[in-house]
Every structure is written in structure tokens, then in C-alpha cells.
Image (tube, grey):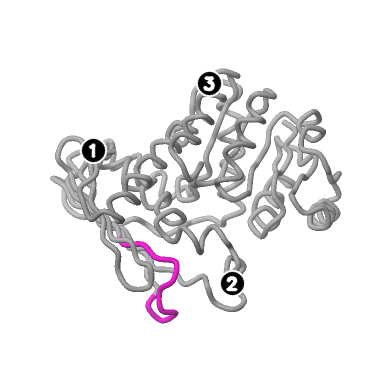
């Protein structure tokens, strides 16, 4: 399958293009970006054509891998789906639930496969953990902490405008939800509070009565970074395992997942519909954080 990369930033360069260029069943066929100079640089790095027009790239590929801000990604994903291209998307799918729903509708109408790269879900140790523990059932509580510190000199995401504006809720929230929802189920309603250093604290109520809490920030004190997820249920307590792969390898697994979905017609668990579900939860959390009320999802 021939892939075009839409985007020219750090993630597109070191993860998406890198994985596609070495994947045994995919071909990196070209790059399009909003900056002609950066597009040319990325294309030259991987020895592929640089496209100045997105429609010209779409005419030459079977699928697109998108590494752009979510408010830019969503309309481009709709456009690519309408052109009949399979979609390998980044998270969050969009910043507005209606925009996320439009991606789902366009993909369904065109009959194209979709995968959203919730990174943890393409890590073998984590996906095995979630599958095995989902089969056990009986999980009634979970807590996740994601305290990162990206706005430091030298961090490749320090200048990310959308991350500065929307914070950890929208950047880290999708990662957190991707490893909470498989065990505790869909979210019914939630409340949220703000903390120092743009920290979002969420209390989620799930179908069946389970509850989870999340604490998320991109701006933790450099010496106060933390990552961890704990789960509690009828079979005991457990924690999310460590990674057993790299980001590039995880993205390669996502490429394979999209190829499988396109070939079999069976949607992947992390398809655009799941991505839209996550956007609806994050939007509700944003409203709850602003209003200090319980918000239905």
C-alpha cells in the first residue's frame, strides 16, 4: 500500500516517515506539508517526492498518515476519505466532537479503513495486558497520572502552539483514555478540576458503575514528572506494564493494523469511531473544567 505523509514536524519525521520507509508491506510514496521548505527537507531525507498540492499527493497514494494539529487533521482526513484513501490518523482525532464525527461519517461513506494512533495500543506488552484483563472483567476503579514537562528548551514539542493552548487534557487525555476504556467501559458522565501548572484532574463514571480518575499536565515541574496507571477489581490490583517496543516500531504495528482493516473490512479497535468517542469525552471534560459541574458525555 502506497502512503503519503501529511505533515513535516518532528513526529512526522522521526516516527511516521521512519516507520513507513522500512515497513515490509507499505511504501512511503510522498510528503505534503504546509511549509514548502520543510516538505522538501523531509522528502529529501527519505528520498521521496515532495508535493506542493495535497490533491496531487492523494492521486498517487492509497492511504495517508497524518501528523498535523488536530484542528488541521480533521478536515484533511475528511477530504482524503472522500478521495477514497485509507486513514492512519493521530490523536486526538479533532478538537471538536462534530469535526470528529464528520471524519467517521466520511470514512464510513467512502468505505475506507481508519486507525487512530493511540500509541500505547500498539505496544505489544500493553495491548496484551489490556486484552487479557478485559477478558477477566470485574474492574471497578482505575487511576492514571501523566505529568510531563515538554515546555523546556530542547524539547521537540516545546513550540507546539496547539499543545500550549489545549494542554495535557487534549494531548495526554487520549493516551490515558485509550488504556482506561478497554477495562472500565464507556464514560457516562464526569467532573473536572484545574490544578497548578495547567493540570487537569478528571473523575469519570463508567457504564456499570466503575469509576476512574486521571491527572494530566504537559507543564509539570521538571523534577516532578510521573507516569503510571493502576487498576482495581474483583481479581485484585494491577498496574499498566512498561513498554517493550519503540515508537517507530509501534507506528509500524499501526500501519499493519490499517492494512489488515483495509484487507478484511473488519474495523480496528482504535478506528475513527473510537477516536471520536475519545473526543466527545475530552470535550465534556473541557466543559466540566470550565463550569465546575458534572457533565454527561
Q: Is residue 217 magenta?
A: yes
Q: CA distance from mark 2 to mark 3?
A: 38 Å
Q: Which residue is mark 2?
A: 155
**Quadrant in the rendering for residue 42:** bottom right
Q: Secondary structure at mark 1?
A: strand
Q: Residues within 10 Å of mark 1 (few under 14, many from 20)?
A: some
Residue lying at 57% horizontally and 28% vertically, measured from the top left = 260
Tag in front: 2 or 1: 1
165 vs 128: above or below: below
Q: Which residue is mark 1?
A: 188
Nearer-N-terminus badge (2/3): 3
Residue 204 is one of the magenta-drawn residues:
no
- Counting other residues with Cα less than 10 Å from the Cα at mark 3, is it few (<14), some (14-19), or many (20 or more)? some
Residue furthest bottom as drawn: 223
Q: Which residue is mark 3?
A: 108
Instruction: Specify few, some or many for label 2: CA neighbours under 10 Å numbering under 14, 14-19, or 20 or more.
Output: few
Label 1, label 3: how far apart the Cα atoms are: 25 Å
- Residue sitting farthest toward the front: 291
Give the magenta range. 215-224
Amino acid at each position: 500500500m502506497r502512503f503519503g505523509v501529511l505533515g513535516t514536524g518532528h513526529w512526522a519525521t522521526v516516527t511516521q516517515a521512519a516507520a513507513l520507509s522500512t515497513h515490509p508491506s507499505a511504501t512511503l510514496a510522498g510528503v505534503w506539508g504546509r511549509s514548502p521548505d520543510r516538505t522538501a527537507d523531509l522528502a529529501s531525507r527519505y528520498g521521496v517526492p515532495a508535493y506542493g498540492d495535497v490533491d496531487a499527493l492523494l492521486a498517487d497514494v492509497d492511504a495517508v498518515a497524518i501528523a498535523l494539529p488536530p484542528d488541521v487533521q480533521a478536515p484533511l482526513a475528511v477530504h482524503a476519505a472522500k478521495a477514497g484513501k485509507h486513514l492512519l490518523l493521530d490523536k486526538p482525532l479533532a478538537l471538536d466532537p462534530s469535526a470528529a464525527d464528520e471524519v467517521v461519517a466520511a470514512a464510513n461513506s467512502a468505505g475506507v479503513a481508519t486507525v487512530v494512533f493511540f500509541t500505547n495500543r500498539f505496544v505489544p506488552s500493553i495491548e496484551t495486558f489490556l486484552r487479557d484483563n478485559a477478558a477477566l472483567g470485574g474492574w471497578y476503579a482505575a487511576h492514571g497520572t501523566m505529568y510531563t514537562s515538554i515546555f523546556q528548551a530542547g524539547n521537540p514539542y516545546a513550540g507546539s502552539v496547539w499543545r500550549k493552548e489545549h494542554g495535557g487534557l487534549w494531548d495526554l487525555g487520549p493516551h490515558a483514555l485509550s488504556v482506561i476504556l478497554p477495562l472500565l467501559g464507556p464514560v457516562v458522565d464526569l467532573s473536572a478540576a484545574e490544578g497548578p501548572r495547567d493540570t487537569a484532574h478528571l473523575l469519570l463514571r463508567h457504564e456499570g458503575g466503575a469509576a476512574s480518575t486521571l491527572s494530566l499536565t504537559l507543564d509539570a515541574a521538571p523534577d516532578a514528572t510521573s507516569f503510571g496507571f493502576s487498576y482495581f477489581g474483583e481479581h485484585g490490583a494491577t498496574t499498566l506494564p512498561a513498554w517493550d517496543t519503540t515508537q517507530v516500531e509501534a507506528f509500524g504495528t499501526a500501519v499493519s493494523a490499517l492494512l489488515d482493516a483495509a484487507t478484511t473490512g473488519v474495523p480496528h479497535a482504535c478506528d475513527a469511531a473510537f477516536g471520536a468517542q475519545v473526543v466527545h469525552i475530552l470535550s465534556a471534560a473541557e466543559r466540566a473544567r470550565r463550569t465546575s459541574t458534572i457533565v454527561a458525555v
